[in-house]
Image (spheres, grey):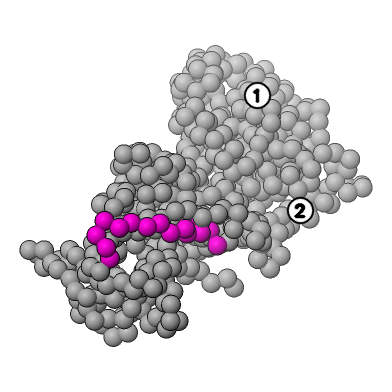
Amino acid sequence: MSDEIKLENGIESGGFIDDFVKEDIAEGGRFAGMQVHTRFPPEPNGYLHIGHCKALTIDFGTAEKFGGICNLRFDDTNPAKEDTEFVDAIQEDIHWLGFDWGDRMFYGSDYFEQTYEYALELIRKGLAYVCELTPEEFREYRGDTSTPARSPWRDRPIEENLDLFERMKNGEFPEGKYTLRAKIDLASGNFNMRDPVLYRIRYIEHHRQGTKWCIFPMYDFAHPIQDALEGITHSLCSLEYEDHRPLYDWVVNNVSIPYHKPRQIEFARLGINYTVMSKRKLRALVEGGYVSGWDDPRMPTLCGLRRRGYTPRSIRNFCERIGVAKVNSTVEYGFLEHCLREDLNLVARRVMGVLRPVKLVITNYPVGKAETFEVENNPNRPEDGTRSVTFSRECWVEAEDFLAEPVPKYKRLYPGGPECRLKGAYLIRCTGYSTDAAGNVCEITAEYDPDSKGGNPADGRKVKGATIHWVDAANAVDSEIRLYDNLFSVEAPDAAENVFEVLNPDSLQVLTGCKVEANLKDAKPGESFQFMRQGYFCVDSRDSAPEHLVFNRSVSLKDSFKLG
């Protein structure tokens, strides 16, 4: 069987973006004869999450599809919470997903000198001025009608603007004293065109520039300049920047960049139920101790999803299959799980693990005897071969696979109940049980049919009981298993007044004393397995050690998501 996961209904990720690109590179198009060139511009003030992954996939994927290239550019023009920790993590996440930027990694701060010179150019052209209004005052002047008042400093002389702007750069004024504004159209119906701020004063240390600069360009001014300087053909961004596009075009049309002008195309952001995508809220979860860190497996961050056991292919396939749209919508978290389950079903080795163990003693099995069964590792991949699993008189089975008093239609173990299969071993029939002082079942007894090796009776009789997974008690490996659920208890946590009040108290359940087969004693961090009848699990990359194995449940076996 091929490992390829096919897209449902022939959906392609590009959609209208592909149509625009094809139009632009066709003969007579604005970029005819040019190489498609995109960029992914994350701000290094947090870790990438699944929402960024959609943008990342579109940026890099569009370039791949059209034989182009994609730059990685860190948008570090707002240094308040930017850090090299996030720079390193973002690079790791992108590489993990299978994308690469080659030698085209840049920083927005690389262009501070050029951006400053372009600001001077706008001032000299009479297209920018130094303003003394506070943001609150300017909102009053800007108004909400077609005839707002003008800033008292809108017609400040050019030479005075040049002098003040240089003194702003030299650190002569306090924060908030002055801003540099574009002089565009105060009567515009688009408020982004009503003399937007281009520069503000901030006395803060930059993670790369140190204290060299105390004025910083606004994103709407810096970003189009950076795109143009790098030769970007298509600036692909999320839908909230649609109203900013006229300003984007105004900037590249009014500064003398000797290159082509990029085309901005917007697409809808990714929303997923039962989670939040705001980096501010994710940061608050981390800093407030509600999760164990940015890589907590309940977090929608890529490092969290990776630690939980998500694969690069499952995430890329998810982003491909939801496609691109012009309207914001919310995708079911169950579909992300579906993509992971689909991938792991193809590649994950099958093993046996008992989460809530109870001892099973096969009373008619010879004391001291041990034998070995060969079990296939993955029915979907014959090339993965088999593994040896030992069997002896005592095994561990799931507590839920036994009831002292069976309920109707219960087909597992109970005294006098039907024959059940021990997966790949023998048929057994429960004969009794014992309890501890608290009344908890601590041991189950059973007898086996020696002529049913492999789980198949010699006489071909029909087995009415269930097939049960087990672990040989003689060499079982103790482990800790963590079961994860949604971090939030409501579908739309962003709609809550306080997201911390809708956290799911049962989002993490830690099970200790679990038993897994001996083959897992050398499992590597991040390695994924299917625990038969239980789900898909991976070795925790932070806390697991050879002497203390820790497995995270990535996703259950049951798929509740229905493809439409």
**What residue sits right under mark 1 in the picture?**
111
Give the distance between the C-alpha atoms of the residues marked 1 and 2, in whole angstroms.
30 Å
The three-letter code of the residue at mark 2 reads Asp
Residue at 25% in and 52% down? 513
| Within-10-Å neighbours for mark 1: few <14, some 14–19, many 20+ | some
Taking 180 as reference, is 68 left or right?
right
Residue at 11% in and 63% down? 436
Instruction: Please tell me in which quadrant of the rendered image residue 455 appears.
Output: bottom left
Task: Tell me if I can see residue 356 in this picture.
Answer: no
> Dot 1 lies on which element?
helix
Q: Position of residue 355 (x, y in %)?
A: 31, 58
Taking 392 as reference, is 165 left or right?
right
Question: The N terminus is located in which quarter?
Answer: bottom right
Task: Tell me if I can see residue 23 in this picture.
Answer: yes
Instruction: Please tell me in which quadrant of the rendered image residue 274 appears.
Output: bottom left
**What residue sits right under mark 2 in the picture?**
18
Taking 155 as reference, is 536 left or right?
left
